Amino acid sequence: MVMTAGRAGDFARRVAHRREELGLSREEIARRSGMDSGYLEYLERSAYVELPPGVLMRLAAALETTLPDLTGGTVELPPGAGGAGAHPLLARIVQ
């Protein structure tokens, strides 16, 4: 099974940005994820990549993030962790 890693170019930017946020080199992330640093550089510069799920999970763990965050699955979600209330009620406020 092969997973597409996000929108074209977005995955590369997310990987590079997260690595920089952590203040780590490509070599360190490559070591943590068990991949070659040249391959990681390729991932950070590619417009489109397809990676096996295991590689994505190792990379997410090395970058100390979640698989959905790394692949862009949370990009268009509204902020906040909660869902709707148990009994939502729409009320009109009259001033």
Image: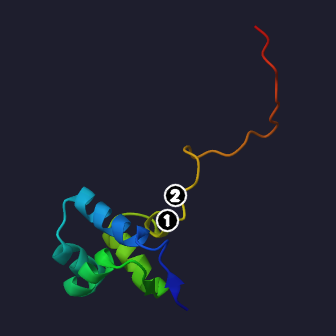
| Front position in the image: 83 or 14 | 14
Q: Which residue is mark 2?
A: 75
Residue kind at label 2, given as amino acid type: Val
Residue 21 on image: x %, y %: 26, 56
Inspect the image, locate mark 1, and give the three-letter code of the amino acid beneath it: Gly
Q: Quadrant of the N terminus?
A: bottom right
Question: Does 34 appear above or below 78?
Answer: below
> Which quadrant of the figure contains the C terminus?
top right
Q: Write down the residue under mark 1.
A: 72
Residue visible at 35% across and 66% down in the picture: 13
Looking at the image, residue 78 lies above or below residue 44: above
- Residue in the foreground of this view, choosing between 44 and 22: 44
* Picture quadrant where residue 39 is located: bottom left
* Residue count near mark 1 (Cα–Cα under 10 Å), binned few <14, some 14–19, many ≥20: some
Q: Residue 57 is drawn in which quadrant?
A: bottom left
Please state the horizontal and vertical placement of residue 44, each as a whole percent of the image. Answer: 30, 75
Q: Secondary structure at mark 1?
A: loop
Q: Do the numbered discs 1 and 2 sit on residues whose CB atoms are within 8 Å? A: yes
Which residue lies most toward the top here? 95
- Is residue 92 shown left or right of residue 65? right
